[in-house]
Amino acid sequence: MGSVLGPAAVYGSRDVSDLTGVSPRQLQWWDERGVVSPVQRSHRRLYSRFEVVQVSLVVALRQKGLSLKRSRAVLDAFKLYVGQTGPACLDPRPADAGLYLVTDGEKVYIAESLDETIEAILEAQKPVIGISLSSIISRVDGIDGPKPVQQETRSPSAWNGHLSHAS
C-alpha cells in the first residue's frame, strides 16, 4: 500500500549511531522510553529519515544543555509542526531560506527565515536556544552520510503521534 509520503530511506541503528554520535544502546533506551521509536523487524530497529532528523534534534538540544524531558517536549512540538506543514517542510532549502527552531525549553517556535528567528529571539522573555533545522536536515541528507539499508513506504501513523505546530 502506498503512502502520501512516498518511499522513504530506512536506516539501521549502526548508521544512525554513526551519523548522530548516539550509541546503539542509547538509541535502544530512547526507543524503549518513546523518545524516538523506529519500526522493528527481526530484532532490528529501522529508522526513517524523519526519525533520524528527530534523533539529531535531540542530540543538538542535549548538547546545548536541555534535559531529556525538555528535549522531548521540544521534539513533540517539532513533530506537531511537521504534521501541520507536511513533510515537504523537511526538504533541503537554500541557505537564505532555512528552517530554525527557537526554544526556552517550554515554548517552541519554528522559524522559516533568519528574520523570523531573530524576531523570536528578541521577543523571548527567557534565555533561548536556537537550532538550525536546515543544518540537521542537510547532515542527514549528506552525500557522505549513511546509506539506507532498504527503501520502504511508511504511513504517517508510523511517526508515533500527532504532528502539528505547537507553541
Image: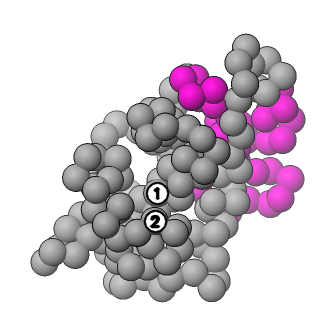
Span shown in magenta: 90-119
Q: Residue at x 51, y 69 (%)?
A: 21
x, y (%) of residue 42?
13, 78
Residue 154 against residue 63 in the figure, above or below: below
Residue 22 badge? 2
- Marks 2/1: CA–CA distance: 8 Å
Q: Residue at x 69, y 36 (%)?
A: 129
Question: Label 1: few (<14), some or many (≥20) within 10 Å?
Answer: many
Residue 97 badge? none
Q: Quadrant location of the N terminus?
A: bottom left
Of the pair 45 and 143, the residue shown nearer to us: 45
Of the pair 150 and 69, the residue shown nearer to us: 69
In the picture, measured across the screen, residue 37 lies left or right of residue 86, that is left
Of the pair 37 and 95, the residue shown nearer to us: 37
Residue 55 badge? 1
The amino acid at mark 2 is: Val
Q: Secondary structure at mark 1?
A: helix
Question: Label 2: few (<14), some or many (≥20) within 10 Å?
Answer: some
x, y (%) of residue 145?
57, 81
Residue 33 against residue 154 in the figure, above or below: above
The amino acid at mark 1 is: Val
Label 2–label 1 contact, CB within 8 A? yes
